[in-house]
Image (spheres, rainbow, N blue to C red):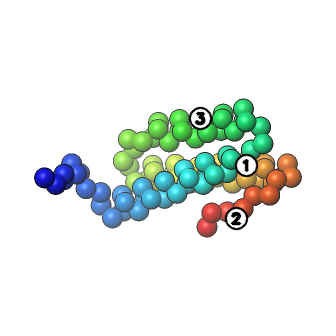
Amino acid sequence: MTKIPKAALSLKQFMLRQEVLKLYREIWRTTRLVPDKHSQRELREWARHDFQANRSQDDEVAIKMLLQSGRRSLTELRTSLELSGLRVKGDGK
């Protein structure tokens, strides 16, 4: 018996979902570079909390705004790490 999803995603929704997952992975990878384990854990908890809090968001404009905010936060984290002397790989583009 084949399971049919309750609601299939439209192409736009699918593409947005992929962008969100990509951002989450980039944030997770970047937090690995934080030398202090306590700070690393806090950053991961912050990311997980923010993504889970907006998990049910289905407004395309709101999701795009959240993506933009998340990318800005990721850029700030990478900049902070670079200023502390750590080498950060690429910008994820």
Q: Position of residue 75 (x, y in %)?
A: 69, 54
Ranked by sequence position, the earlier of labels 3 and 2 is 3
The residue furthest bottom is 93
Residue at 60 percent across and 36 percent down: it is 46
Ranked by sequence position, the earlier of labels 1 and 2 is 1
Circle 3 SS class: helix
Q: Is residue 48 left or right of residue 90?
A: left
Res 35 → quadrant = top right
Asked whether residue 76 appears in the rendered view, the answer is: no
Residue assigned mark 3: 45
Alpha carbon separation for disc pair 1 and 2: 13 Å
Circle 1 SS class: loop
Q: Position of residue 52 (x, y in %)?
A: 47, 38
Residue at 38 percent across and 41 percent down: it is 56
Give neighbour class at mark 2: few <14, some 14-19, many 20+ (Cα, 10 Å). few
Alpha carbon separation for disc pair 3 and 1: 15 Å
Circle 2 SS class: loop
Residue at 52 percent across and 57 percent down: it is 22
Residue assigned mark 1: 33
Residue assigned mark 2: 90
Please tell me which residue lies in front, 22 or 72: 22
Ranked by sequence position, the earlier of labels 3 and 1 is 1
Checking the image for residue 12, the label placed there is none
